[in-house]
Image: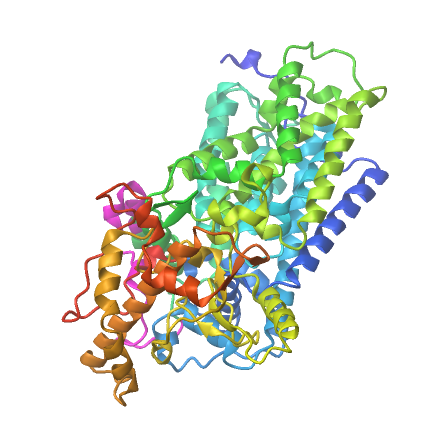
């Protein structure tokens, strides 16, 4: 495009003009009040929740980074959020497990985390509260970034609408205080893209440093943040194609219009950006290249999933990792974590609406967005799209207040907001093509962008437009009611399209619904039940299958433990008959995703189960022997065979329970079934319900190899790629 035909923008209007970002004092008070309400709702909700799946690893690993200067534990999850969350623990009286043990030498993050939380006498609630308090700070920063972007694009009214949508979003309220990388990644995207876009129009020391630091912080937040690099190239191509001038400090504010001259400045800017970003990355790793601070040859090791060697087989990205490592451009733990992420994106067990897959569905994330987003928010987004479409046909010089006039040209709005919508498109394309379909939370970085562009509805919040303002106020009130009604179960929120949260376990599980957060709620529920049965001579037996990293013992949950996601200690691999009682089963466990019998009950599972069922008397004899827990191959084989039977029996029970409604629920993530002796007999010995509904001769689930007693069965046949992140 000819340079004289570029979009007309002033120096302040072409990017995030800082003088237009704050607004009047009353607006700042409203924004502050909304964000305080957001923090209160989010933090008050997680007070009654146990540790979620990833938090235990993040907090333990982050603390180890500070205390040991070693980066062997969970390097794939972003060092910034882990360090940030663990910062208050460094000045607290917490204890870390001994480093003189195989779990540390073998870089077992889960083992060290379980010891840190439950094995050395730390106060779990205090540690969680401190870590979550740090994360809510990042959530507030993200709220400010949403306001700044929307205020710039759509004026004061748009900024306020966007903040309302963010502050009351169940998704933001659920993940804002959690000790994970999701909220940090979202905040980093909003800030770094703004700094980058500003620097692309105004090159000076301040913009170069701000953009470089923001890029570096984003890179150490989450491995998927590397998407910002092709985004930057695309944004540069867009501004060059539109012929936008470049303002360089020291040129008396004369824009650089010559492409050759601009290219010279771009070379300098790119080099400066990468240098600053790399400094930030290296700073987070203590300017040390190696993963281990102190290691002994043959003793300290990383899992093979972290190996950089062999990454050439992963295509261009893998080859880039190997080259970067050979040149020493990035620290080794950073590249090891990135390598594991690349390997893990191929296949992953997932569940959607009663279907099971290892490679996912292209409809998974669109469906998540549809059922996990409140209707008022969806209506705001639709209204914003309609407003922009209608406004695109109007004369940009049409009357309007000074606060709305800068964006009445939709082309200008789309140009100024290019970093956001471009990232939105790239991220959604990657999400749809990805084989990792385990959680709605992976869409979190795109939600703030939706909230920003929903601010286009603010066009109607003008003087003498009260008729249009009334529906906006009604939608905001509706969203407020939705947020209050689903407190404190924000993680389990589902809208009416999915029938609400009560039936959500039939649609999505894992971190979309059940992330191990409701152990305190289960404890309270059991206490109420026991108080009601106080007059009974024989209270009902309690059976529990839990998905998560919380400890049933720590929360005082007394019940017979059924097969669960957690690795079984050998002493718990014991046969006991299932009887009438209260069965408390996590939604993820109910859907049979993370046990070796994966998916719907099948003919092959049934054949395997019936074969092992005849060996129950032998199981009872084995576990009565003194050598049952020995480390011999024979003892291990016996325990493996018994564990296989227990998992098959449990999955057959789950297939039966999937055909009926739960009798009660705890936080929508733990399902309660009151089973009679006849129910148990039917589930374990009657005709399998799912086989009856399957086409004749067609297995309904994934088929494992049939197990025979003469062959050793692995204690755990789940690969690392099957585990939640």
Horizontal arrangement in the rendering, residue 398 relative to residue 93 (left or right): right
Horizontal and vertical percent for residue 350? 39, 48
Is residue 312 highlighted in magenta?
yes
Residue depicted at 38% across the width and 41% down the height: 434
Residue depicted at 59% across the width and 36% down the height: 449
Quadrant holding the C terminus: bottom left
Q: Furthest-left residue in view?
A: 710
Inspect this view and state whether residue 725 appears: no
Please provide the residue range marked out in magenta. Answer: 293-322
Question: Where is residue 101, by image quadrant?
Answer: bottom left
Residue depicted at 58% across the width and 61% down the height: 84
Horizontal and vertical percent for residue 502? 57, 49
Is residue 164 highlighted in magenta?
no
Q: How many marks?
A: 0
Q: Nearer the viewer, residue 430 or 616?
A: 616
Q: Nearer the viewer, residue 351 or 649?
A: 649
- Residue 682 lies, with reference to residue 533, above or below; the image says above
Horizontal and vertical percent for residue 515? 51, 57
Question: Where is residue 340, by image quadrant?
Answer: bottom left
Horizontal and vertical percent for residue 583? 49, 65
Inspect this view and state whether residue 706 appears: yes
Q: Nearer the viewer, residue 7 or 118?
A: 118
- Residue 77 lies, with reference to residue 503, above or below; the image says below
Horizontal arrangement in the rendering, residue 610 relative to residue 680 (left or right): left
């Amino acid at each position: 495009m000819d340079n004289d035909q570029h979009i007309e923008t002033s120096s302040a209007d072409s990017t995030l003009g800082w003088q237009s970002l704050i607004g009047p004092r009353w607006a700042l008070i409203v924004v502050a009040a909304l964000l305080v309400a957001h923090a209160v709702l989010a933090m008050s909700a997680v007070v009654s929740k146990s540790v979620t799946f990833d938090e235990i690893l993040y907090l333990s690993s982050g603390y180890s980074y500070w205390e040991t200067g070693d980066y062997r534990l969970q390097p794939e999850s972003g060092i910034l959020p882990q360090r940030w969350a663990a910062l208050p623990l460094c000045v607290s009286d917490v204890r870390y497990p001994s480093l003189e043990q195989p779990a540390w030498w073998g870089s077992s993050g889960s083992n060290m985390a379980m010891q840190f939380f439950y094995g050395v006498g730390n106060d779990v609630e205090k540690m969680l509260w401190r870590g979550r308090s740090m994360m809510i700070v990042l959530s507030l920063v993200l709220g400010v970034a949403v306001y700044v972007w929307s205020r710039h694009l759509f004026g004061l009214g748009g900024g306020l609408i966007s903040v309302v949508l963010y502050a009351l979003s169940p998704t933001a309220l659920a993940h804002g205080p959690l000790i994970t990388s999701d909220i940090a990644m979202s905040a980093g995207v909003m800030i770094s893209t703004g700094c980058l876009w500003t620097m692309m129009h105004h090159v000076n020391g301040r913009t170069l440093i701000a953009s470089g630091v923001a890029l570096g912080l984003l890179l150490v937040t989450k491995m998927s943040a590397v998407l910002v690099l092709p985004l930057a190239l695309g944004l540069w191509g867009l501004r060059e194609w539109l012929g936008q001038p470049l303002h360089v400090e020291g040129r008396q504010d004369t824009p650089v219009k010559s492409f050759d001259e601009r290219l010279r400045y771009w070379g300098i800017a790119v080099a400066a950006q990468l240098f600053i970003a790399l400094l930030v990355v290296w700073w987070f790793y203590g300017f040390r290249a190696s993963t281990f601070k102190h290691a002994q040859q043959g003793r300290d090791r990383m899992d093979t999933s972290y190996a950089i060697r062999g990454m050439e087989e992963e295509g261009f990205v893998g080859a880039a990792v190997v080259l970067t490592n050979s040149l020493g451009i990035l620290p080794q733990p950073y590249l090891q974590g990135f390598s594991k992420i690349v390997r893990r994106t191929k296949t992953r067990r997932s569940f959607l609406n009663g279907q099971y897959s290892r490679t996912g569905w292209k409809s998974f994330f669109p469906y998540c967005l549809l059922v996990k987003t409140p209707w008022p928010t969806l209506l705001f987004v639709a209204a914003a799209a309609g407003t922009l479409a209608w406004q695109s046909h109007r004369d940009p010089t049409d009357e309007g207040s000074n606060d709305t006039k800068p964006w009445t040209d939709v082309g200008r709005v789309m140009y100024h907001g290019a970093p956001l919508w471009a990232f939105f498109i790239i991220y959604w394309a990657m999400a749809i093509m990805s084989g990792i379909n385990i959680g709605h939370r992976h869409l979190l970085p795109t939600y703030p962008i939706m909230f920003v562009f929903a601010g286009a509805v603010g066009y109607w919040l003008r003087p003498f437009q009260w008729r249009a303002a009334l529906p906006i106020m009604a939608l905001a009130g509706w969203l407020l009611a939705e947020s209050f009604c689903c407190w404190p179960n924000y993680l389990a929120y589902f809208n009416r399209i999915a029938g609400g949260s009560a039936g959500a376990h039939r649609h999505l599980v894992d971190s979309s619904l059940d992330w191990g957060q409701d152990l305190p709620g289960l404890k309270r529920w059991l206490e109420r039940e026991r108080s009601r049965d106080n007059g009974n001579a024989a209270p009902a037996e309690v059976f529990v299958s839990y998905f998560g990293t919380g400890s049933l013992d720590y929360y005082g949950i007394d019940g017979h433990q059924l097969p669960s996601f957690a690795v079984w200690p050998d002493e718990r691999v014991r046969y006991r008959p299932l009887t009438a009682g209260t069965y408390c089963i996590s939604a993820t466990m109910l859907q049979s995703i993370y046990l070796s019998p994966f998916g719907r009950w099948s003919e092959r599972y049934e054949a395997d189960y019936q074969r092992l069922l005849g060996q129950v008397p032998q199981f009872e004899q084995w576990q009565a022997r003194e050598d049952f827990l020995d480390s011999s191959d024979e003892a291990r084989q016996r325990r493996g065979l018994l564990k296989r039977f227990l998992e098959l029996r449990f999955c057959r029970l789950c297939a039966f329970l999937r055909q009926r409604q739960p009798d009660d629920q705890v936080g929508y993530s733990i399902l309660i079934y009151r089973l009679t002796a006849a129910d148990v007999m039917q589930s374990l010995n009657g005709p399998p319900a799912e086989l009856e509904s399957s086409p004749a001769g067609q297995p309904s689930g994934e088929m494992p190899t049939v197990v025979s007693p003469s062959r050793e069965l692995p204690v755990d046949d789940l690969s690392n790629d099957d585990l939640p992140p």
